[in-house]
Amino acid sequence: MLRISHYSKTYPGGKQAVQDLNLHVKPGEIFGFIGHNGAGKTTTLRSVAGILDFEEGTITIDGHDILREPLAAKKVTAFLPDNPDLYPFMTGISYLNFIADLYDIPGEARTAGIGRYGEAFGLTGDLGSSIGSYSHGMRQKLALISALIRSPRLLILDEPFVGLDPVAAHRLKEFLGELCEAGGAVFFSTHVLEVAEKLCHSIAIIRDGRLVKAGPTREVVGDSSLEEVFLELEGEDHG
Amino acid sequence: MGKKFRALLLVNLRSMLLTSTRGGGGWRGKRALSGGGLLALIAFLALYVSVTYSSLMVSQLAPLGLEYLAVVIMGMLSVVMGTMYTVFAVQGVVFGGKDNDLMLSLPISPFQLMLARVMALVVENLVCTLFMVVPAGVCCYLAAGGDGLYFLRLAAAGIFLSLLPTVLAMVGGWALTWLSARMGGRGVLAKNLAYLLLLAAVMVFAFFSSTALTQLASYAAGLEQAASTWGILFLWMARGVQGDWGLLAAFLAVCILPFLAVVWLFGRSYKRLLSASGPRARRTAFRLERQRAAGQTRALVGRELRRYFSIPIYFFNTGVGPIMMVIGAVAALIKREDLSILTWAMEKELGLPMALLLGAAVTFMLATCAVTATSISLEGQCLWILREAPVSEGRLFAAKCACQYVLTIPVTLVTVPLLCWAMGIQPAEGGLLTAACLLFALFHAPLGLVINLLFPRLDAPNETVVVKQSMAAMLGIFLPMAVIPLGALAWFLLGETLGAAGVLAVLCLVLLALTGGCWAALLRWGPRRLGQLV
């Protein structure tokens, strides 16, 4: 579903954020991307989503190169940033319709999707209000609904559980499972190692822009916990 | 305490006046002092208006011993201009700042916080009042003389007068902010209507002032009467500048006391005011019904238009030109006979082609409608939404230009032929002029986008800074005005040979080439540049 080959990203100031990254996310897989602050997770996710340009390596989504066929790749992708800024001059429902129009979602399908996910996240009653009046969590939920109504093949999430209440977090986990059962894939970053360990089929750990460990969760964790593995790898770095 | 206030003041002034460009590649870290440029522009306009009209007024009033009325009138005008200008900014700077939460959490007194916020507005008004009142005072001094401290009193009057429009703008801005929070979508309409009323009031004031200025001597008694009743404050100022220290002190007190009172009151109730005016103040209960699909292009253009009409300062900063064109066309139809005579006189007596003069006026009006010049900056931190969506950059640019075209093209197509007809311009010249104006409108929109891609401002604390203060906003308005001297040059070089129609045809070709060039640059270089901005 997602293949990242020899991906590197250097910012204009000369800072190399990611170096020679190789990853493969298979259909039906929830893939966790873990690393300390500034490790290069968000940079990678934004490049995968087609938001950030890069010069080295290739990223293909469902067979489409994000640089050569950006529209085809984006059509099957949904991205949720860690702090989703949405248009404050729109209402929730007009934003969802705007997104649905950009993805050519027919009227019936969008009504059903908005109804289903809106109810699940407890946001339907607030969809007529201005986004400017939303709390951080409500904006997060609205952005999630706008991502889920597209029925993406690849869902890219940057710290999706931050700001969500426990019920919404539980619902999100269910929806991620459904998406994978339908043949889609989820690629997400998180600092909540317990969630990653329980939820992810595969995990990659990145440090200072370089991949230090990747593979099925069971293999990465082994007999210990993900937290221990992560701290051990961090310790190696600082030792 | 003083240190804290100074730091806060600097942050607020910098936020208001400085514009940093932001993006990738060679543009990173580049800073441009466009706020200063804007202040210089206001200063120039105020100086120009004041010098022109003050000298005219003083020459007529000095023989009657009423030259001080020039200071009164310029004082009034500067207050109207300042209020008009800063009332737009209050919502963004005082009530809509993205850093409100941070500011309120700082260990600083509410009075100091509000004072630091408001000082940015005072600076803008100060430029306006100083550059309007001081030239009027200088003209009076040259006509009637004064003592050694005349200029000290004049400077004090100009400085303290800036507090008056600040107070008016704060009260007006707060009322509009509160209204829009209470009324939701209807509030935007109400706010736009309120601004329109304000604009109409200013235009009526300008109309009567302009009529009165040409025959000041016969209006002198009425002006004196007005100055001694509802304009008494300005009379105190003028008399104070002339040497009446008591009246000057009274004037200064009337300026500073309400200012301090409003700052204190607003500071004391800042949290409450923000709560009452914040977007959370109004919520609606929503029931989901069947939704309809619209398609990408309609969605993108609709979003641009929705934003345009939702941000009053955006609408009024760029919408006045087309509104004035409509008003001008209606007025021209009413005054058709007089204008036909004027056209005949201009062309036969002075040898100036009316079609080109009208073209220059229309170009000026259309240039002020620089909607696209800030439309990328206004995406701000939401730019990721468009970058993530399966929308080509070309379609995105087209939607942004379409928003401007919706405003300028119908107005051009309707008003320019009407103006030509009302002014008795030959049909061939009128047709070519309409085509030239249409091509200018077509050229202006992509040019604005190119400018905004070169000078983006994605991290502005509020929309006011983007729409009013940014480099892109200024260049988007003033750069395309270069077409006016270009037209004049074409007339001087080719006028005798080709005539007005020929020069207009040449200008059409030039504008066609410029439009094509702008679109080509936008579609080739624009996508890469946009990619660097995120």
Image: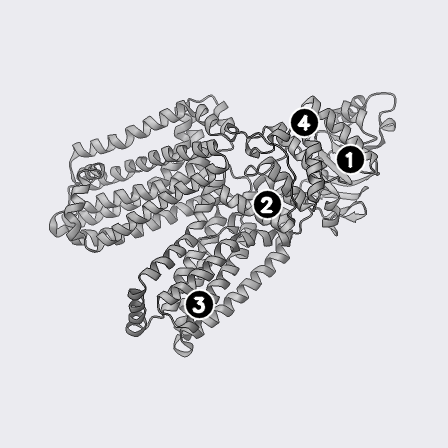
Q: Secondary structure at mark 4?
A: loop
- What amino acid is found at the position of numbered circle 1 in the picture? Val
Return the chain for callout 4: A
Q: Residues within 10 Å of mark 4 (few under 14, many from 20)?
A: some
Q: Residues within 10 Å of mark 2 (few under 14, many from 20)?
A: many
Distance from disc 2 to disc 4, alpha carbons, whole Å, reads 28 Å
- What amino acid is found at the position of numbered circle 4 in the picture? Val
What is the residue that sits farthest to the left in this orientation?
B64
Q: As drawn, is B318 to the left or to the right of A227? A: left
| Residue B344 vertical position relative to residue A45 in the rendered view, above or below | below
What residue is pinned by disc 3?
Answer: B433
Cβ–Cβ under 8 Å for marks 1 and 3: no
Return the chain for callout 2: B
- What amino acid is found at the position of numbered circle 2 in the picture? Gly
Whether callout 2 and callout 1 share a subunit is answered no
Q: Secondary structure at mark 3?
A: helix
Return the chain for callout 1: A
Of the residues tagged 2 and 1, which is closer to the observer? 1
| Residue B67 vertical position relative to residue B337 in the rendered view, above or below | above
What residue is pinned by disc 2?
Answer: B23
Say whether residue B1 is visible.
Answer: no
- The label shown at residue A186 is 1
